[in-house]
């Protein structure tokens, strides 16, 4: 979310400035540079992007609509803190749409697209080898977005972008520290199935991959702990 300060203006490039703010905040969340609960001050963001408070507020409202920012009355905007229930819903939604996205990607498969996927896998492996955790997290999400772009289905792509951003927050909050966020081997298996036009294998690989990511999260409801504590103390 870094950019040089510029004079504030609501000139004809207003929509571009809103997009830059949205993309900057989203990228910082995907790379785990912005943590859940971080306050997103309108004045500070405006100085960073050379935008008025009106444009900053518009960008934050759009991000709030996507569920990755919370706007609290009289307090301002904050990076969202998804609950365990939110996490389960996000991964349920991903398991519903991503196998279908893979189907569409196979229909659209071409040597150029396969090359793009293979190049992306190489970038993921390089980030992993050099121990660049931020790049690994970002590239993991970008892999799923790239497959959705390949599918040519704009509605699914829009849904998935939102779900990927929410997933990044969820992984940051709930991932067990001894597990990777998203396996490059799984991605390689998905690409191999797409290249072979093996729909059954591609769908199965994607479902298994998403299920494993969720299984590696420590999704525990605080309310459940309170209930058990009350049971113990009241015994």
Image (cartoon, helix red, strand yellow):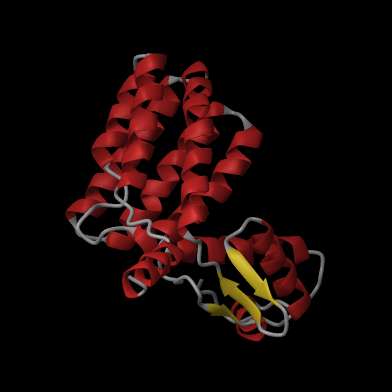
Considering depth in this image, is 35 or 219 the residue closer to the camera? 219
Q: Position of residue 217 (x, y in %)?
A: 33, 53
Q: Quadrant of the C terminus?
A: bottom left
Considering depth in this image, is 117 or 80 the residue closer to the camera? 80
For the point 42% across and 61% down, the residue is 221
Question: Can residue 197 be seen by looking at this rendering?
Answer: no
Q: Is residue 157 above or below residue 22?
A: above
Q: Is residue 145 above or below residue 221?
A: above
Considering depth in this image, is 76 or 129 the residue closer to the camera? 76
Question: In the figure, is residue 109 to the left or right of 17?
Answer: left
Instruction: Give the tally of numbered discs.
Output: 0
For the point 31% across and 40% down, the residue is 212
Question: Can residue 75 be seen by looking at this rendering?
Answer: yes
Q: Position of residue 215 (x, y in %)?
A: 32, 45
Q: Position of residue 141 (x, y in %)?
A: 42, 48
For the point 53% across and 61% down, the residue is 26
For the point 24% across and 62% down, the residue is 177
Q: Is residue 58 above or below residue 213?
A: below
Q: Position of residue 56 (x, y in %)?
A: 70, 73
Question: In the figure, is residue 45 to the left or right of 139?
Answer: right
């Amino acid at each position: 979310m870094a950019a040089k300060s510029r004079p504030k203006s609501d000139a004809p490039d207003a929509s571009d400035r809103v997009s830059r703010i949205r993309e900057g905040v989203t990228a910082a969340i995907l790379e785990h540079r912005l943590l859940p609960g971080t306050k997103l001050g309108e004045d500070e963001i405006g100085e960073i992007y050379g935008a008025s408070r009106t444009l900053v507020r518009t960008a934050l409202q759009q991000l709030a609509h996507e569920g990755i920012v919370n706007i609290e009355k009289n307090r301002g905007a904050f990076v969202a803190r998804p609950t365990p229930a939110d996490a389960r819903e996000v991964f349920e939604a991903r398991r519903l749409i991503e196998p279908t996205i893979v189907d569409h990607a196979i229909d659209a498969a071409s040597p150029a697209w396969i090359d793009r996927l293979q190049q992306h896998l190489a970038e993921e492996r390089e980030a992993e080898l050099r121990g660049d955790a931020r790049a690994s997290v970002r590239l993991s999400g970008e892999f799923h977005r790239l497959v959705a772009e390949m599918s040519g289905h704009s509605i699914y792509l829009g849904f998935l972008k939102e779900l990927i951003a929410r997933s990044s927050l969820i992984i940051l909050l709930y991932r067990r520290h001894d597990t990777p966020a998203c396996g490059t081997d799984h991605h390689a298996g998905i690409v191999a199935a797409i290249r072979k036009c093996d729909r059954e294998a591609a769908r199965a690989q994607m479902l298994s991959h998403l299920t494993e990511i969720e299984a590696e999260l420590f999704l525990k409801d605080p309310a459940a702990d309170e209930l058990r504590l009350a049971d113990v103390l009241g015994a």
